[in-house]
Amino acid sequence: MSALLWALVALPLGAGVLLLVVGRRADRAAPGVALAVAVSALGLAVTAAFRHPSARAPFLDGLPMRLTVDGLSGLLAVTVTAVTLVVLLFSAAEFGSGEARARFFGLMLLFAGSMLVTVTAATLPVLLMGWEVMGATSWALIGYWWRDPERTSAADTAFLTTRTADLGLYLAAGAALASGAGPTSYSSLSLDGLARADEPWLSFITAGVVVAALGKSAQLPFSFWLSKAMRGPSPVSALLHSATMVVAGAYLLLRTGPLLDASGWGDDVVAWTGAATAILLGLVAIAQADLKQLLAASSCAQIGFMVLAAGAGATTGGTLQLVAHAAAKSLLFLAAGAWLTALGTQQLPALLGAARHHRTVGTAFTVAALSLAGLPPLSLWAAKDVLLAGALERSPWLYAAGLAGAFLSAVYSAKALWFVWRPAVARPDARRIPAGAVWPLVLLAFACVALVVPAFPPVRDSVSRVLAASGQPAPHAWEFALSAGLALLAAAGAWAWGARPLPLAARAKAGFADWLGLERAAHVLLVAPTMRLARAAAAFDDRVLDRAVEGSASATVRLARWTDDVVERAVDGTVGAVAAGTRALGRWARRPQTGQLHQYLAQAVAAFTVLAVVLVLVR
C-alpha cells in the first residue's frame, strides 16, 4: 500500500526533474512524456482514493516522513491529477513547438507533484516541503517567458507575497514543536494533532496556519498577487488557479478545521475573511476590462466561499465547491488562452463575438461561466448552497454575506458572456484553434454539468461519510430556489446593463479596477518601510561601520609604522648593545688564556691572595 502512495508523488516529481535536467533535447518528447505521466498519476490517485494508503520513511531522529490518503486528500488528489491531465492535453496541442517545451512540461509536472505532496502530507514538515516546492515552481511558471521584464516582475511579486505569508507555517511548526513533549516527539507536528496543543501555543499555531493559508489562496489582504500571476501562460493560470496552488490554502483550512474550532477565534476569523473576499473581490471582478483579470478576481471570490466553508465547519460543501470550481475555472482560463492565441487579445471590448467565431469553445466557456454564476442545474449552484447551509446554521449574517457574494458571481459571469457573445465584425485574421485544444474544454464542460450530482442525496451523504464529516447541515429546497432566483436576477440585470459603465463614483471604480489598491497599500505599508530600513542600514554600514573599519585599519597601519620606527629601533639597538658588550667581555676573558703554565700559576696566586684579603677584611 505504501508503494502506491510513494509512486503517486514520486512519478510526477521524478519525471518533472528529468525533463528539466535534459532540457531542450527533450522538447519533442516532452508533451508525450508529460501526458503519459499525468495519465498514470490519475490512475494512481483514483486507486489511492479508494484504498487510503499510508507511507512512512525515516527523516529526522524521532520525526519520520509521513504521507497518508484519507477521504479529503483522496478527493483532492483525484482532482489535482485530473485537472493536470486536461491542462497538459490542452498545452500539448496549443503550446508552440518553438517553445522550451521540456522546461514547461517539466515545471508543470514538478508543480503538480508538489501539490500532491502538500495534499497527502500528514505532518507539518512534509507539508512545508511540498508547500515550498510549489511556491518555487509557481514562480518559475509565472515567469516562464523570462525575457520579458514585466513577467519576471509579476512572478517576483507573486512569489514574495506568498512567501511572506508562508512564514506563518514556520511559526505554526515552531509553536507546535514547543508545545510537544520534547524535540524528538513528532506527534505535536501531526496535522491531526495540532488542535491538542495548549495555550498560548494553540493560538500561535492557529495564527500561523491561517496567515499561510490566506496568503496562498489569495484572500484578503493578499489577493493582489493573483492579478500579477496572470502574466504567465494561460495553461499555467488554468492549473495554478483552479485545483492546485490557489486552493491549497483553502484545503489546509478544511483539513485543520478542528484546530480552528479549538482556538475559539480562528473559525470566525476565517469565515468572515472568506465572506469579505467573496464580496469585495466579486466587485473587483465586475470592474475589470481584461478577461483574465476578471477570472483571476473571480478565483479569489470563489475560493472565498471555500474559506467561508472551512470557518463555518461546512467541510462537505467546501470540498464540493473546491472540486466544482476546479473544473469550471480551468475551463474558463483555457478558453481565454485559446482566444488570446487566436485573436491576440484578452481585453473584453476586443473579444466581442469571440464565442460566435469559435462556437465549440464559446459553448464550453458558456457552460463554465453559467456554473460560476450559480445557475441551475450546474455544479457550483448546488455546491454553493451546501456550504451556505453551514453558514446559515452558524449565523444568518454570514449566510447573507454568502448570498451577496453569490449574487456578484452571477454579475461578473454574465458580464463576460455578454462580451463574448455580442455580434461583431468579421475577423479574417483570426487563427484557427487546434482541435486538440478544443476537446479538453468539452471534457471540462461535461464535468461542470456532472459534478452537480454529488451535491444532492444520496451521493452527498456518501461524500460526507468519505470525508468523515458527520452532522453536516443540509440545505432546504427554499435555499436552492433562493440562490437560483438571485443568480437569475443578477445575470439578467448584468446582461441588460451590457457594457455601460458602473454607476459608481470615479474613485470607487478606479479602486475596484485596481484591485482595491492592495498592491499600493502593500508597497506603502511594507515595501517602502523595508526599503527605507534597508537604505538606512546601508548608510549606517557605509558611513559608520565602514568608516570605523577603515579608521581602525589606518590606525593599525600607523601603529605598525611607529613600532617599526621607534620601538623596533630601540629593541634592535638594545639587542645590538648587549651583543657588543658580550663580545667585549669575551675578548677580555680570552686575554688570560695564554696556554703558559707559569702564568696560570701566577693568576691563581693572585686570585687566592685577593680572596684572602677579602676574607680578612670582612671578618
Image (cartoon, rainbow, N blue to C red):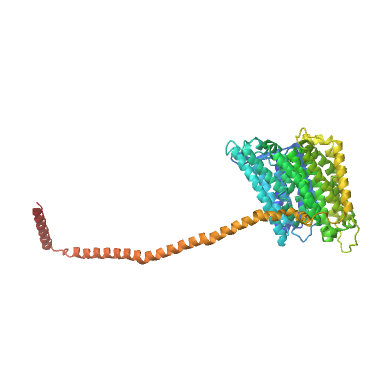
Farthest top residue?
A: 471
Which residue occupies the foreground of this view, 100 or 460? 460
Q: In this view, does 96 lie above or below 220?
A: below
Instruction: Tell me where residue 610 appears, x and y as whole percent.
Output: 10, 58
Instruction: Tell me where residue 452 appears, x and y as whole percent.
Output: 85, 41
> Can see residue 415?
yes
Q: Is residue 215 above or below residue 464?
A: below
Quarter of the image for residue 151 reads bottom right
- Image quadrant holding the N terminus, namely top right
Farthest front residue?
A: 505
Instruction: Tell me where residue 40 appears, x and y as whole percent.
Output: 77, 46
> Can see residue 250?
no
Q: Is residue 276 above or below residue 498?
A: above
Quarter of the image for residue 387 reads top right
Please name the residue shown 19% across and 64% down the image: 588
Which residue occupies the foreground of this view, 382 or 251? 382
Instruction: Tell me where residue 290 appears, x and y as whole percent.
Output: 80, 57
Number of marks drawn: 0
Farthest bottom residue?
A: 565
